[in-house]
Amino acid sequence: MSKNNHPLAHLFTTESWSSPRVLFGDYESDIYSYWLDSAYFEVDMNSSKPPFSMLIPPPNVTGNLHIGHALNTTLQDMLARYHRLRGYEVFWSVGTDHAGIATQNVVERELHKDGITRHDLGREKFVERVWEWKEEYGSSIKNQLMRMGASCDWSREWFTMDDNLSRVVRHTFVEFYKKGLIYRGEYMVNWCPRCLSAISDLETNSIEGKSLMYDIKYPLADGSGHVVISTTRPETYFADVAVAVHPDDNRYKHLVGKMVELPLVGRSIPIIADDYVDMEFGSACLKVTPSHDANDFEIGKRHNLEHLEVIDADGTLNQLAGKYAGLDRFEARKQVVAGLEEAGYLIATHDHTNAVGSCDRCSTVIEPRLSEQWFLSMKDMAAVAIDAVESGEIKLHPPTWQNLYFDWMTNIRDWCISRQLWWGHRIPAYYCHNGHTTVAMETPTSCATCGGEISHQDEDVLDTWYSSQLLPFAVLGWPEDTAMMDRFYPSSVLSTGFDIIFFWVARMIMMGYEFTGKKPFDNVYFHALVRDSNGQKMSKSKGNVVNPLELADKYGADTLRMSLAAFAVQGRDIKLDLNRVEGFYHFTNKIWNASRFVMINAQDATYTEPTISDKGVVDTADRWIIMELNTALNKFSQQIEGYNFGGAMQTAYDFFWSTYCDWYLEVVKVRLAGVDTSTEDGAKIRDEATSMTLYVLRSSLIMLHSVAPFLTEYIYQQLPNKRTQSIMLEEYPNPAISQALQDGGEGGIAEAFQSATTQMSLAMEFITMVRNIRGEYNIPAKVELSILVRCDEASQGALEQSQNLVHALANVGTMNFVATLEDAPEGSATKVSSNFEVAVNIKDYIDIPQEIARLEREKKGLLKDLSVYGKKLENKRFLESAPKEVITKDRAKVADLNEQLESVVRALSSLT
RNA sequence: GGGUGGUUAGCUCAGCUGGGAGAGCAUCGGCCUUACAAGCCGAGGGUCGCAGGUUCGAUCCCUGCACCACCCACCA
């Protein structure tokens, strides 16, 4: 394709390249569209590549991209893009979650503005309304994911309430029901009086808080005295059905079987014995209210007690509370206590710390409530799922999460899956007039039990997580035997936050085995959770929410992604440090400017693809950079594949900035300086040098592409050495070359390239040393230095060969190689590194007393180090037990230190 | 009450299976060396939370403690 009719041609203008600042705003969205139009994210079912697949944790349709999404999107996209470059057929499945309560809340809130409730509309109309809302606003999260550069396969996008996914929901429900794993019954559940629905154990948060404990007198019915009960919930006493004491409690043994009267109410209830009661706690008399407390419910079951209800679904008291009827539970508490106090029944009040449950969605205090709900039996499925992780069939990364997983799975309880909502998957249970239940995929025509007419469908919907747990196979077309299922199940890796390990991950594992007989994924990667810069959880109420899209606006999506990748190191918290984001913006600019430099230099050059061999690459610096590049590429791969995203980011950063820009490009400048490119020889030098800079640039961009996709594509498109339509179609640099460079392999080039590396390192060591001297003595860069050097022959040879570099990068005029520095002229500064000892005449710059002080400091340090190592090497047991390499290393170190010391001492004596 | 993670430079954090600790930012000094001053070249700065133990040797392993964070739990 010629440049002119390239769909992105409008981006590649001379103006855009003249800017020393990266212009991310100009190209990000166009590049994303280009990828979309080219269908690069879509699965090619005809390819023979090995599969790599992931399932996105589906964001809520109501959702806005928060920083956690941004993080996980970045990490997943890195995996996806990296694996594409590695030659995998990547399927990254994407979709959104209907998010029952959350979405219903949003629409209800809207209705509320118009002064109506969902009940005014009725079920059907209301659900219609939610669908309308979904059609209108549901795509905003999608656009936000695209903004981040997510390379998901949008052509196969799904929504958890799509017909096919809903069918899977019903299918599994029916299967479970047939197996007897789904059952219905009246149990104590967590009830949210605001959502007016049952919620699962996982959807509650226990919040520790200060409350009051009330001691209340219950008179004995026979008038022989009273007992004192302690409670934090006096407003429930109207529904008390017994008072319990411990069977071994001698204080109360004689009372068991007697009756007490409820104060002011007068109803008589028995005193019973139950060993649940803690004899140490309070008065050790427990009021038993089976309808409003989970423990009391159990006690009630054991003693066959009746259930009285005083708190209604909406959290207000009912007729049973007499004059308190209609009051909200918390208001009622105050008034009931006041009433009891007035009548003399309240004996004492004390402070008490306890934990109350609150609704995960709306923070309303949970009411334990007795109601009829659907449950899914978990124990057996959990056992299989525990096994899968224990045996290593499914790997958790980092593995520390295993303990938590095992712990929860071992103590798993049945899952309350019904919700009293309208928005969601309606439970496929139908009732006839005789009260029989028929569970079926589609509305049955008659009752399965009695053949009678079906009167109605169950009103409840399923917990949102019920459908999410089926996604790994549901999105691939299960229960049909599809090609997608065949190719991409189980998926390769699931990346998610550890906060949903129980909600989602554990359940997917159980469902996978239950329905497909296979694990749903090979690996699970848990990333840390993003906190603000003080380590606090981000929340709207705290006002500390960082909006990732604002950061993307300010610095570009690539910068944001690189920052997030860098933050993703092992650990549980990520503190979002905006200074670091700023740092990565600098890096984005660095990539931009280095590319500009390379391309400007390459403008008139002819590119030749270098052959990585002895003959193909002859220049020392070229061989060295090839080695460095190879090391970085390998390290980056290992780190990505080990889910060490922060490390990978660091690797790419260090290579590109510190090695490629700071050294290699500077060396190339030296090579190109003063070359007359109008001559054939000059042009050849230029072509060779620029070809290598371009080659390394292209490789670096490929490495960086997974984390900074937009910028790397933008630059790639304009590279003279681009090989394909898109950087996305490139391949990660060749493993065979990598092997050859490492161990000789094919062609045996390792040795030659290794010696180039040694030579470069020596030159770099020397240049750095000279720069140190300049820095310390404030010798301007313009002042050319002549230097006395003492070193071994090999180092001398290396240095002589790199003379032009030393001259250009350290401004060294002459180097005189000498056997000893003892004859160095007075007023010389000396410096020692592991391979060189140098003396520089600095008498115009030196401040003698300051220099003496500096040398004394250095001497002190050296003596200290020497004594540490000396002691070590005198220690017989060290010599006996330490590995040889360590001893050799330490001996060399001592020799080195001694040399340095000698030199410092000599310098000192020459000054004093 | 049980459990998990953390404590390393002024700040945010790296540090792989034990061999005298690194980066970015910040600070200080010097450079407009025409890719980048959002840059380049240097410098200073650490009892690796505290106390024991194992070891020739501990930031790393073990024990205890302190503080921070999070998770789980049916003491009213």
Image: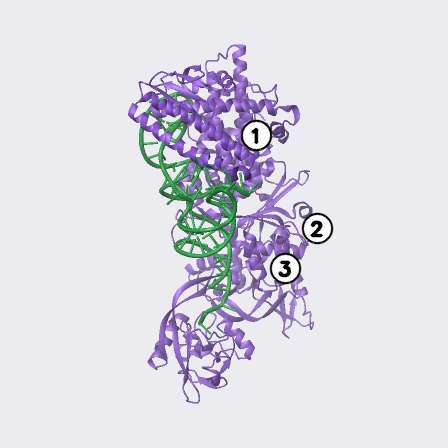
- Residue A592: tell me if it is visible: yes
Dot in front, 3 or 2: 3
CA gap, disc 3 and disc 1: 46 Å
The residue that mark 1 highlights is: A630
Asked if marks 3 and 2 touch (Cβ < 8 Å), the reply is no
Q: Assign a secondary structure to mark 2.
A: loop
Please rate how many residues cluster around mark 1, counting C-alpha atoms within 10 Å: few if below 14, some from 14 to 19, many from 20: many
A542 left or right, relative to A136: left
- The percent coordinates of residue A431 (x first, y second) are 62, 70
- Residue A149: tell me if it is visible: no
Residue A481 is labelled as 2
- The percent coordinates of residue A660 (x first, y second) are 49, 27
For chain B, the rendered hue is: green
Of residues A621 and A760, which is closer to you in this image?
A760
The residue that mark 3 highlights is: A383
| Mark 1 and mark 2 on one chain | yes
Indicate the amino acid at tag 1: Asn
- The percent coordinates of residue B76 (x first, y second) are 44, 72
